[in-house]
Image: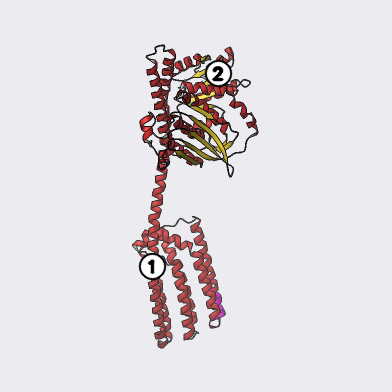
């Protein structure tokens, strides 16, 4: 037998929500019914026999137990009900409830007077209204039960006394009509609410699917950016080495300016490429900060190595104030932000100096600042320059290279770090860019930090270095470049070859390797880790030079105490970096 005729089309459409609401309110419905039974027992105890009271009590308790067990099994998923079976059970449960109260009325009507029956009908009407609000989700079923109750009361009263029937019938009909109106109004309101819930649920599901698709897109974009980074950085790196080699071998004064312009063009292209790639990775959400205690002095030393020669070429004085402060930060992001600040300061300053330093602030904070004596920025444009592709008119006229992304990248990284960006500028006098960071406790090992400040001009002469790369052009010119710096260079193709050279000729002081070596089961990082294991008493300085900028590789390298540099590299910066690295041995 199909029970679907008991539901309207709207109730069919919202069936799951109706059943969910029905089960959710079951406990309250049973509690109200039981309280109603207790009230009637107290009011009408004298009108029923003891056997009738016992029968009604047992049947009520049995009804409550059966409904509770059924509802609990449904909620726990032990009963996989079809729609028709669930409708049948709802009908049986509701009908049983109505039959119980009709039985109570029948027993009461046999001995009670008219006023007692009116009291009972009012109590029953109140209980019915409450239970309709709780359980009246299926309009046809409850309408039929209300009509059945009115008919039953009418039959019982008319069989007793026609006068009593006339007086009670009007009250019963009015109460039934009010219940039917309330039932219809309630279900209309609930229907609208459930429809909104369905629409919201559909929107949430659609949003979840969009988020899943977006996450998959971000992962794909990250992989694409990583692959594109390596494929585009490799030829730029080789071109930079070729240009440096040509400059080193050139003795023609007429060609020298051309080679210098080529080097500047390559450097500008590299900076623009790095900026666009970094901005794409930040917007894709694939860059996550790795917070740890970072020595500002170590970051300052690296920045001084990178920008000192560039500043001297422009006739500027780069001053880096020593500091003992440690901050809670991501060292790579902090370096990138300050590097952008210093690069802009050097680029847009014609004369004077650039000062890098740190000042302690209140609440255990520190301000890391970069001052310059450049042209300055108008106050109304101080925040505009942190947007993508924004450069001031002066910069567009006087400075070549760059696409206006450096400060936009700095702003996004500062946001990831939770750091406050600081900007102060006076037109014609200079600017100050910086950020506010939380201080970190100074480790005991930082006592040795002062040794890092005493940089020696050349620590490379006579050192043994092994180089690995899958690009023949790059490795050939890198070998010649390193040899011109008076290093003993060995070209290595695999970890097995490295082991053989160490066994025959001795240990290496420095090992430079690309990450992708074109080997089946071995990366540059694998080779560097094996080199560390082969030289436990004389660990080499290991540097991974790669075009792969993925956060996973960066983190993996840092975990194994391997330095990482990204292609393309300017030879002057590479030499300064290696000198700084070897000075800390």
* The furthest residue to the front: 428
Q: Position of residue 544 (x, y in %)?
A: 51, 25
Q: Which mark is residue 470?
A: none
One can see residue 2 in this view: no
Looking at the rendering, in which quadrant would you find the N terminus? bottom left
- Identified at 34% across, 62% down, the residue is 9
Q: Pointer 2: what residue?
A: 458
Using the numbered discs, state the Cα–Cα distance from disc 1 to disc 2 in whole angstroms. Answer: 91 Å
Q: Position of residue 407 (x, y in %)?
A: 43, 36
Dominant secondary structure (helix, strand or loop) of the stretch shown in magenta: helix
Disc 2 is placed on an element classified as loop
Which of 530/231 is in front? 231
Q: Is residue 48 magenta?
A: yes
Q: Which residues are magenta?
A: 44-56
Q: Pointer 1: what residue?
A: 139
Q: Position of residue 189 (x, y in %)?
A: 39, 65
- Identified at 48% across, 80% down, the residue is 120
């Amino acid at each position: 037998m199909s029970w679907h005729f008991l539901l309207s089309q709207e109730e069919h459409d919202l069936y799951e929500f109706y059943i969910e609401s029905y089960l959710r309110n079951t406990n309250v419905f049973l509690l109200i019914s039981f309280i109603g039974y207790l009230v009637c027992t107290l009011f009408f105890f004298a009108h029923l026999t003891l056997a009738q009271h016992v029968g009604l009590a047992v049947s009520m308790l049995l009804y409550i137990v059966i409904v509770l067990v059924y509802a609990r099994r449904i909620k726990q998923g032990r009963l996989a009900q079809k729609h028709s079976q669930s409708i049948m059970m709802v009908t049986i449960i509701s009908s049983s409830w109505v039959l119980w109260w009709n039985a109570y009325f029948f027993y009461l009507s046999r001995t009670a007077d008219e006023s007692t029956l009116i009291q009972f009908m009012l109590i029953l009407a109140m209980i019915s209204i409450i239970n309709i609000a709780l359980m009246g989700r299926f309009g046809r079923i409850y309408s039929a039960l209300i009509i059945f109750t009115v008919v039953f009361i009418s039959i019982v009263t008319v069989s007793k006394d026609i006068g009593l029937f006339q007086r009670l019938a009007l009250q019963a009909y009015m109460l039934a009509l009010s219940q039917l109106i309330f039932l219809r109004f309630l279900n209309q309101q609930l229907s609208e609410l459930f429809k909104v819930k369905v629409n919201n649920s559909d929107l949430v599901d659609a949003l979840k699917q969009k988020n899943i698709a977006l996450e998959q897109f971000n992962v794909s974009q990250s992989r694409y950016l990583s692959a594109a980074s390596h494929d585009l950085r490799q030829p730029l790196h080789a071109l930079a080495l070729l240009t440096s080699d040509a400059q080193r071998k050139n003795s023609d004064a007429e060609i020298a300016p051309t080679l210098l312009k080529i080097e500047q063009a390559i450097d500008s292209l590299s900076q623009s490429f790095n900026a666009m790639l970094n901005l794409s990775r930040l917007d894709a959400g694939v860059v996550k900060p790795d917070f740890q205690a970072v020595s500002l002095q170590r970051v300052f030393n690296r920045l001084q190595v990178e920008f000192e020669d560039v500043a001297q070429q422009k006739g500027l004085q780069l001053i880096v104030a020593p500091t003992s402060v440690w901050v809670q930060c991501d060292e790579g992001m902090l370096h990138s932000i300050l590097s952008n600040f210093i690069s802009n300061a050097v680029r847009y300053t014609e004369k004077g100096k650039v000062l890098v330093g740190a000042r302690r602030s209140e609440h255990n904070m520190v301000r890391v600042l970069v001052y310059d004596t450049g042209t300055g920025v108008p106050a109304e444009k101080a925040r505009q320059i942190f947007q993508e592709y924004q450069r001031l008119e002066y910069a567009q006229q006087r400075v070549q290279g760059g696409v206006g992304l450096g400060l936009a990248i700095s702003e996004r990284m500062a946001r990831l770090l939770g750091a406050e960006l600081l900007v102060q500028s006076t037109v014609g006098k200079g600017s100050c860019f910086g950020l506010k960071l939380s201080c970190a406790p100074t480790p005991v090992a930082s006592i040795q930090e002062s040794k890092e400040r005493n940089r020696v001009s050349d620590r490379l002469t006579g050192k043994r270095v092994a180089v690995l790369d899958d690009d023949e052009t790059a490795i050939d010119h890198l070998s010649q470049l390193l040899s011109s710096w008076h290093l003993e260079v060995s070209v290595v193709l695999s970890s097995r070859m490295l082991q053989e050279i160490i066994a025959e000729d001795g240990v290496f002081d420095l090992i430079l390797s690309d990450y992708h070596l074109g080997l089946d089961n071995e990366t540059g990082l694998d080779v560097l880790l094996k080199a560390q294991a082969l030289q436990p008493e004389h660990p080499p300085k290991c540097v991974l030079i790669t075009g792969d900028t993925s956060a996973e590789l960066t983190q993996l390298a840092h975990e194994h105490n391997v330095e990482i540099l990204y292609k393309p590299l300017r030879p002057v910066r590479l030499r300064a970096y290696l000198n700084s690295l070897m000075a800390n041995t």
